[in-house]
Amino acid sequence: MATATFEEISASDFFYRNRDIAGFTNPSRAIFAAIRELVENSLDAAESLKIPPDVYVRLSFEGEASQDTQIYKLRVEDNGSGIQPRFIPSAFGQVLFGSKYKLKQTRGTFGLGGKMAVLYGQIMTHQPAYVTSSTGSAKIYSFKLMMDIQRNRPIILDRKVLINKEQWRGTIVEFTLEGDYLRARPKILEYFKQTAMVNPYANLTFVDPKGRLYKFNRATTDMPDPPKETEPHPYGVDVELLQRLIQVTPYKNMQEFLKFHFHRVGDITAKKFLEFSGINPSKNPKKLSHQEVVKLMQHLKKFKEFLPPDASCLSPLGEELLKAGIMKELNPEYLVVNQRKPSTYAGHPFIIEMGIAYGGEIPKKGSFVIYRFANKIPLLYDEASDVSYRVINSMNWRRYKVSPDMPIAIVVHICSTKVPYKTVGKEFISDRPEVRREVANALREVSRQLQHFLSKREHVDREKRRLSVFAKYLPRIAEFSTILAGKEKRPDIQKLIKSVQKYDTEEK
Amino acid sequence: MTQKKSKGVIAEKKHEIMGSLKKLGTQIYDQLDSGVFPTITMPSRSTENIHYDPDLRQYVLGEKSVTRSARNIRHVKPFTQLAWAAMFSNELTFHRKTSTLRDVYYSAQAYNMTFKDQQESNNIITDLETTTGRSREDFNIFPEERSAVFGDLTIEYTVPGYEGKTLNLSSHPDGVLIGPALTSSEFASTKADKVIAIEKGGLFTRFIEENVHTKHNAVLVLTAGQAPRQTRYFIRRLHDELKLPVYIFTDGDPWGMHIAMVIISGSANAAHLRELTTPDAVWSGVWASDIVNYKLPTDPLDDVDVKRLHELQRDPRYQGDPLWQREIKTFLKIRRKAEQEAFSRYGLTYIVDEYLPAKLENKDKKKK
């Protein structure tokens, strides 16, 4: 399974040596990364069954580790799909377990899920991980695991089977790790808040080492349709993926290989492509030489007649849910959201969802508050490098009568089978023209509506002021003229005040 | 000169003023009562609507008018202020109380009618003047006073507490302040046969000390620089009601010349008002030619003086009597100016004993 490169060291060994890549850069970042990996796994596990997620996270203090770091126990419970017992050891004890021949939108930034977190915990504390899970069947399986890092294999230290009287379903993961919670705390809380914003149907609970409870309650039980699995689109494949497909394919000729392993490829397209690339349709894919595989990939990218990918493999939040999430976490005075039609870059479908919120509890900061999300996870680092940051800052806001000193928050959500992160850090979206265009269009759309709202509100305010001026002065004129004219009874001016109101509403 | 008497002028005027204020109030009331937004129309005071009337020999407002409507969001506040000012003036007039512009500004606050600043409240008073064609002094609103009068003129007070009391204006040697009580007085009698208006206080005192009022049988008026409106109105009344000719003595420079001109023909700022001018009054000196003829000690004209002379040369008020253009030219020729006090080089009484008789005689001759 491993390629030549990976024969030297195991996959888990590789990540052990390069844990920076996975976000475990330093003690504060590590604790944040561990929480987020497990929370995102839990959310995915509930969403795959279209069950509103309940995720409980508890971080408890176990002891001092060094001057700046402590040992913590992290426990994450969910009500998700649960894991079949035979997969549990591998799912948490073996890096790069599972196959990725098929694509769908998932949260996990690295596809490593909790394995990296467990791996990190083991490296730092040499403690086992405890995994308890049930798919809702009659039994609950509980494992005590460690990882054989050099051989990339799970070591089962203990295994228990319990009777599932309550028909509980879900997964509980518990392990110890070293980190710096005090420094990580602001990011962790921000992470929960933003995760709640973009998962308005989830209940999130976090108990921190001091016993403080942070609770983010769901605002709805409506959920987006779970993403469908899809084959990779020909424009988006690389040699590595082709190799893997060739290894596992049951099909014995190129015509069927193309038809069944690629998205939007049917008999006719496959035939046309094979003519175009000069490959014999009856050739067995397993017989392709390395050079032929490279050539195949090049031709796949060059062929113009593949249909663009469809977006059924994406699970955007949708305008209603995005609205609900932003309303619940930001409580703005005004909110408008926009979901763009699916688009593609390099063979990967993506959808941009955008929200702009004004006033209410949004603070005035002198610059817009930007919330960035990719596949329903918040991006909390490197904001200034993100394509949305650039698009937002290059907008001609004066055209929309909007200025950065207004209390405005902008929410950008990109969902894709392959989020176009710029770097291995996976914290910001790269500035690809297709993505930039969609972000800009979405931003323009919501900004236009914000402008309408602002100018309408200004109009109403102006009208109110107008009315109040008349309501203030007309009675005085009546008073003074009555005295001056030597009359007893004041003239009735209510009609006049009303007429100002009526006239002005008709005016616009 | 025989005794002259002019009575009832002030009473009649007061009646008229209250009438015009009530008329304004009734007009607004009736409009409101019939369910329409009230409007007030008044002549426009914009510069293009200010014309010089050669017959009246003063600035007047032209045909253009402006309408203030309570329907207009920008007008409704000044409209209300104007209505308040009219009501306030009516009360002042009715109760025979006086007030100053500063007072008006503060009084408004008692009615919860705040003005942004003094200027705004002054403007509203000017609006009221324009609307009614009456000057603010008629509504008992006076500026701070500094001008004075001295001479054999008996007045009869109309102010509360002094009604019917009389005063001879030669009874106090510093002169009597031309204030609300004086300007609202009726003229009872005078033996004087002329009015001499003087720009500066020093010379006014000198004239009294030297008995100019008896020697020349004159009422002396101190304008104290540019004559205030009520002083101009007072001078006009002396001329109109008592038929006294008016002679004006100022410094021999463009500014003094213009003090005389404003008494004679008024100012553009008061184009909306009448009865503030005395077209028959005469500027008797100090002329530019006097500087030459009397060899007076002088100062050179500076740039602003010259600039002012060029302005006055083009001013319509200076086009009537050839005296004006002649003197302006002389000033520009000699490039010198002299103050009234310059005569003191010939001794303290020279101006009274020599210069004044010569100038008055000169004028008398010219008139006849």
Image (spheres, rainbow, N blue to C red):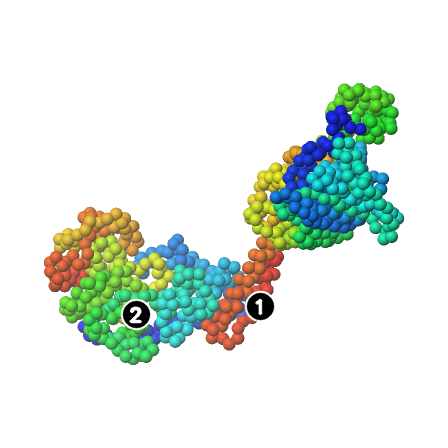
Q: What chain does badge 2 belong to? A: B
Q: Residue at x 79, y 40 (%)?
A: A145
Dot 2 amino acid type: Gly
Along the line of sight, the residue nearer the viewer: B32 or B361: B32
In the image, is A50 to the left or to the right of B197?
A: right
> Pointer 2: what residue?
B179
The disc at residue B137 is none
Q: Residue at x 41, y 72 (%)?
A: B90
Residue A15 in the image: state x and y as whole percent. 71, 34
Query: Do the residues bearing badges 2 and 1 touch, measured as CB atoms within 8 Å?
Result: no
Callout 2 and callout 1 share a chain: no
- What is the tally of numbered marks visible in this picture? 2
Q: Report the Cα–Cα distance between label 2 and label 1.
A: 45 Å
Q: What chain does badge 1 belong to? A: A
Task: Please state, as top left, top right, bottom left or bottom right, where the C terminus of chain A lies in the image.
Answer: bottom right
> Pointer 1: what residue?
A494
Residue A420 in the image: state x and y as whole percent. 69, 35
Task: Please state, as top left, top right, bottom left or bottom right, where the N terminus of chain A lies in the image.
Answer: top right
Residue A446 in the image: state x and y as whole percent. 65, 45
Along the line of sight, the residue nearer the viewer: A319 or A298: A298
Q: Which residue ends up furthest to the right in the rendered image? A: A138
